[in-house]
Image: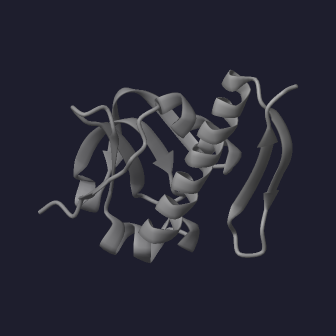
């Protein structure tokens, strides 16, 4: 019986996903048909696989709509064996926030805007202040 659970994400860009994982200091692999380890040796395939430091992985599978689903044995394996930073809500919130931040900074660069401020508030929110060049 598989204990894998898929979680829909809004992440579309694999390069942004991998850069977010790098910036968050996660060990991961990227490629095609990489093995995601689950309950009692069950496996799923993914394009990006995060090593959680235990016998269970977190994978990101590209879907037909070009988004990624995050897949893992969240409820048993990850919760009981991995550090809390890999628990479903913590991990996905952190990755989503970092991906959004990277995407915003890339848009600023593409539009030629000037980045005036880029800081993390006490609440954990990220504040980015830009202006258009004169």
Which of the pair 119/98 is nearer the observer?
119
In the depicted structure, whether residue 48 falls above or below residue 71: above
- Residue occupying image coordinates x 21% and y 64%: 3
| Viewer-proximal residue among 15 and 112 | 112
Q: Measured from the top left, where is residue 28 in percent x and y?
A: 54, 41
If the image is split into quadrants, where does the N terminus sit?
bottom left
Q: Is residue 81 left or right of residue 75?
A: right
Q: Tell me the quadrant of the picture where the C terminus can be found.
A: top right
Pinpoint residue 121: horizontal percent, then vertical percent: 77, 68
Figure quadrant of residue 116: top right
Closer to the camera in the image, 53 or 49: 49
> What residue is at 58 percent from the left and 55 percent from the top?
97
The x, y position of residue 74, in whole percent, is 35, 67
Residue at the spot 51% in from the left edge and 57% down from the top edge: 52
Residue 126, placed above or below residue 90? above
Q: Is residue 10 left or right of residue 28?
A: left
Using residue 132 as the reference point, say whether residue 92 is left or right of it: left
Q: Residue furthest left?
A: 1
Residue at (68%, 24%) from the top-left corner?
111
- 42 or 49, which is in the foreground? 49
- Could you tell me how many numbered marks the image carries? 0
In this view, 106 is above or below 129 = above
Q: Position of residue 45 (x, y in %)?
A: 28, 38
């Amino acid at each position: 019986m598989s204990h894998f659970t898929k979680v829909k994400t809004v992440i579309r860009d694999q390069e942004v996903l991998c850069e977010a994982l790098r910036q968050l200091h996660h060990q991961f692999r990227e490629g095609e048909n990489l093995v995601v380890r689950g309950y009692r040796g069950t496996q799923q395939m993914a394009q990006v696989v995060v090593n959680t430091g235990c016998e269970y992985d977190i994978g990101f599978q590209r879907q037909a709509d070009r988004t990624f689903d995050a897949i893992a044995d969240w409820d048993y394996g990850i919760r009981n064996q991995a550090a809390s930073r890999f628990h479903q809500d913590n991990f996905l919130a952190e990755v989503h926030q970092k991906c959004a931040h990277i995407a915003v900074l890339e848009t600023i660069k593409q539009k030629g805007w000037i980045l005036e401020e880029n800081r993390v508030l006490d609440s954990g929110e990220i504040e980015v202040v830009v202006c258009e060049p004169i």
